[in-house]
Image (spheres, rainbow, N blue to C red):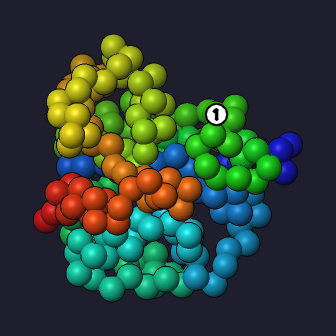
Amino acid sequence: MTNTISTHPFEPFIPENATKLIIGTIPPYRFCVNGELFNDDVRFYYGSRDNEFWDLISKVTNEKIVRENTEQAIEQRKSILKKLGIGITDIIETCYHINGKSDDGSLKIIKQKDIRKLLKNHPQINTLIYTSTFVKSQMNTVGDKSYHTCIDKNERTFSLIINGKEYKAVVLYSPSPNALRGVLEETRLIQYKKVFAI
């Protein structure tokens, strides 16, 4: 597994009304390399059956999320993003999932997507939503000054200048199973309600 390069399987999804952009890392190894998903996986961002992202969004929006490997489940997630005015992408184009693992520490030899170009093509976006602190560290290489300025440490908000434009950035408590052990669900839910409120 360590010798097989993982290529991101999805294009960015950005509705016309999107003013916020979710930026993650890359889907799990099975999504990127062989595409053999479980029946309760969804072939879309944060579609792993182990990831809590869409469960949290379900609680915020009061929409029951379908967890199945169907086109209906994909379209449901796109519909929710359109309602929220949010786009979604990942920062990694290719990498190695060491030993097939998906935690941030196992992602090596990373080639990033061109986030600068993506933002230039969607000037209506003004807020970036990172799904982990690892994404924030990767985004440091994208900014004009290569660093984030803290706005509110408790709220996990920052600012970053890209292509001469200032963006607000929010670092979510990660929804991945490996990152959930130290954060209460209530804490994450409070944050998600603030970030994803309609």
Element type at mark 1? strand
* Left or right for 129, reference 150: right
In the image, residue 166 lies at what x, y percent? 20, 27
* Left or right for 94, reference 80: right
Specify whether residue 108 is in view: yes
The residue sitting at 56% across, 70% down in the picture is 50
**Residue farthest to the left?**
198
Relative depth, front residue between 103 and 154: 154
In the rendered image, which residue does mark 1 sit on?
A: 110
Q: Amino acid at mark 1?
A: Ile
Query: Are there few (<14), some (14-19), or many (20+) residues within 10 Å of tag 1?
Result: some
The residue sitting at 48% across, 58% down in the picture is 181
In the image, residue 54 lies at what x, y percent? 39, 70
The residue sitting at 20% across, 43% down in the picture is 155
**Residue farthest to the top?**
145
* Quarter of image, res 184: bottom left
* Quarter of image, res 117: top left
Tell me: residue 167, above or below residue 170.
above
* Left or right for 23, reference 95: left
In the image, residue 66 lies at what x, y percent? 43, 85
Specify whether residue 16 is in view: no
Tell me: residue 23, above or below residue 63.
above
The residue sitting at 20% across, 49% down in the picture is 19
Tell me: residue 42, above or below residue 178.
below
| Quadrant the C terminus occupies | bottom left
